[in-house]
Image: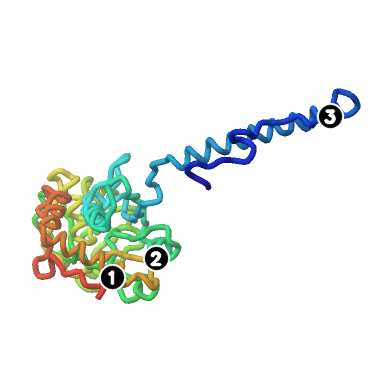
Amino acid sequence: MMCGNTVFPGTGAGHGIRRSPGRGNGAGGGSTRRRRIAAQIAALFIAMASIVSLAACGSTSSSSHVIKIGIKFDQPGVGYKKRDSYSGFDVEVGRYIAHKLGYKDYEIVWVEAPSKQRETMLQNGDVDMIIASYSITSDRKKTIDFAGPYLVAGQDLLVRKDNTSIHGPQDLNGKRLCSVTGSTSATVIKKRYASKVQLMEQPSYAECATALFSGIVDAVTTDDIILAGLASNARGRLKLVGKPFTQEYYGIGIQKNKNSKVFAQKIDAAVNDMVKTGTWMRAIKNSTAGSGYSPDPQYNPPVAREGE
C-alpha cells in the first residue's frame, strides 16, 4: 500500500486521455472508441484504488495492538461474562497485567478458555495468555509455560446457609456431593475422607449450586475461590465451609517458545506489583463480596516467580 502524495499512472496532471492522431470515424473508428472506453474504465478503477488507499492510510484503527486473554465465562467471581461485560478475580488480574504491558481496556480481547482446550489454545497462538483458574502442574509444563502464581486456592465445600452438620470433608459420609463432570475433586473426597459419600455430577458449577439450593445435594466441592464466587452470587443463601484441604497454585499460562521466559518475567513483575499496591486484595474482596471468603494466609498472597 502506498501512502502520502502518491500519484497513480494516468491520473495526475497532464495525463488526460488523448485521441490518437490521424484517426477518424472511418474503418478504424470503432476500434478507437473501444480503446477510449477501455482507457476510461481503467482510469476509473485506478481512481477508486487511490481513494481506498488514502482512506486506509488515514485510518486510526488500533486493531493490531491488542492482547488476547483466555478466561472462563461461566464462573461468577472468577471469570464471568454477562452480555458484553466481564467480571471476576481472574479478569481483574488479566486487566492489571495488560495495563502493565502497555494495553488499554479497549485493546483487551477476552476469549473463552474451556478447561480441555487451554493447552491447545496456547500452542496454536489463539490467545496470548490464559488466566482461568489454571493450576500449575508438571504435566502442563511439558507443553506450555507459566507465569505466577497469582493465587493459591484450595479445595473446599459449599453448603446451604442453615447447614450445621458439615464442617469438612470427613463429615460427608452418607451425604450427597456435587461436582462438575470430569472434575477429580469429588473423587478425592471419596478416596481420602468419606468413602460412603454419594457423588453427583453436573455440567457446570452453577447447576451444582442450583441442586444445592433445591436440596438435591448437601454440598458442592471445588476450589475455594470458585465456591466463594457462587456464594457471593447466591446472596446469602449459601456459605463456604472455609477449611481448604488442598493447595492449587493458579498460574498464567503462556505459549512455550524462545521468548516465553522474558514474557513470564514481565507478567510476574505485574502480579507482584498488583499485590504490593493492594489492588490484589481489593480484587479478591470485590469479586467475592458477601461470601466471607479470604485466601488461606499461609500461602497467600504468593510471590510470582515462575519466570525465574
Q: Which residue is mark 3?
A: 22
**Viewer-proximal residue among 157 and 298:** 298
Q: Residue furthest top?
A: 25
Looking at numbered disc 3 in the image, what kind of residue is underneath it? Answer: Gly
Q: Quadrant of the rendered structure where residue 114 is?
A: bottom left
Q: Quadrant of the C terminus?
A: bottom left
Mark found first going from the N terminus, 3 or 2: 3
Q: Quadrant of the rendered structure where residue 155 is?
A: bottom left
Q: Position of residue 229 (x, y in %)?
A: 20, 51
Q: Position of residue 52 (x, y in %)?
A: 53, 38
Mark 2 Cα shell of 10 Å, populated few (<14), some (14-19), many (≥20): many
Q: Secondary structure at mark 1?
A: loop
Mark 1 Cα shell of 10 Å, populated few (<14), some (14-19), many (≥20): many
Looking at numbered disc 1 in the image, what kind of residue is underneath it? Answer: Ile
Marks 3 and 1 in Cβ contact (< 8 Å)? no
| Marks 3, 1: nearer the viewer | 3
**Viewer-proximal residue among 32 and 107:** 32
Q: Which residue is mark 1?
A: 136
| Numbered label attached to residue 119 | 2
Q: Secondary structure at mark 3?
A: loop
84 above or below 205?
Answer: above
| Numbered label attached to residue 202 | none
Name which residue lies at 59% across and 40% down.
8
Name which residue lies at 74% across and 33% down.
38
Q: Position of residue 57 (x, y in %)?
A: 46, 42
Name which residue lies at 15% across and 65% down.
244
Looking at numbered disc 2 in the image, what kind of residue is underneath it? Answer: Glu
Q: Position of residue 146 (x, y in %)?
A: 30, 69
Mark found first going from the N terminus, 2 or 1: 2
Mark-to-mark CA distance, 2 and 1: 12 Å
Mark 3 Cα shell of 10 Å, populated few (<14), some (14-19), many (≥20): few
